[in-house]
Image (cartoon, rainbow, N blue to C red):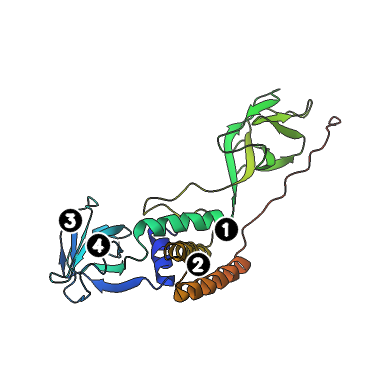
Amino acid sequence: MTTLAELMLETAEKLGAVARRGVATGGSATTLVDSVLDEPDDYLTGGTLWFLSGDHVGLSAAVTIWVNSSHTFTFADPGLGALAEGVFYAAAHCDYPRWLLIASVNAAMREIGKQVTEDISTTTVSNQMTYTLPSGINGANLKRVEIGINSTSPVQYYLHCFWRVVNDTLIFQAGSEPDGGYTMKLTYEAYPAEMDADTDELANGYDAQRVAWEAACAALRYRIAKTGGQDRLLAAMLVDAEQKSAEMGRRYPMRRMMRTPEFHYWGGG
């Protein structure tokens, strides 16, 4: 699965913000040295580092300072010990800091839309008409209710059509209550939890390239607003990113689900 750190790097690449992919010639718990890198002081200060190999692989860090004379990045200690010589890394400049990349990825997922999610945490109880819905599920986003036919894996389900939701309580029509002891599968649409840790994984249903292009759009809109909308290059970049995002949307649309129609129960048999 694609992680937040990988999405941030992909977004930075699309923004043209990755200034260097290199190999560390030294380091410590809070520094990375690249004796080959020759950028002005502070050019990379406030930017982002990604560790692409070694003990720190899969992590990123905000650059607190870049010093040209010592060819040294300084960053907060991730608690993994000294950085080894030979570690591959990538570095982005300060126009798109780490916090902005994280915020842009999360904004992208909200813009793309909700995901179809399944919850199987509820077990039916004999002769019970009402069930409190699990956290995050409500009458507005619940699309389908299914009841297990068997209790051993793999569980097969049948579609239940005689239900409604009142005040976050699932209510089965009288006479249609499912038998007890079976898994209830609730299908609903919701936004995934926000990603904030490097190792957080992209939720199912979202295409990584689509998210990265939409995140690039979000980051560019922030930069345009911050610069007063006068930068023609940023405006042109945003037009291109929006076109790419729209193309990805056509290629990788989000799954949608219609709500099961409500029927009146007339009795079984």
Label 4 – label 2 distance at C-alpha: 28 Å
Few, some or many C-alpha atoms within 10 Å of disc 4 (few <14, some 14-19, many ≥20)? some
**Tag 2, which secondary structure?**
helix
Q: Give me the disc on residue 54.
A: 4
Q: Amino acid at mark 1?
A: Ile
Identified at 41% across, 52% down, the residue is 200
- Confirm or deny contact between disc 4 and disc 2 (CB under 8 A): no
Q: Nearer the viewer, mark 4 or mark 2?
A: 2
Q: Amino acid at mark 4?
A: Gly
Could you say where residue 217 lies in the image, as x and y percent from the top left? Answer: 50, 65
Give yes or no for contact between labels 2 and 3 (Cβ–Cβ under 8 Å): no
- Look at discs 4 and 1 and give the one toward the viewer: 1
What's the CA distance linking mark 2 and mark 3? 33 Å
Residue, far left: 70
Side (left or right) of 90 relative to 69: right
Type of the residue with mark 2: Trp
* Residue identifier under label 1: 112
- Lower sequence index among marks 3 and 4: 3
Q: Position of residue 234 (x, y in %)?
A: 46, 72
Q: Which residue is mark 2?
A: 213
| Residue contact at pointers 4 and 1, CB within 8 angstroms | no
Q: Measured along the vertical axis of the image, is residue 143 above or below residue 206?
A: above
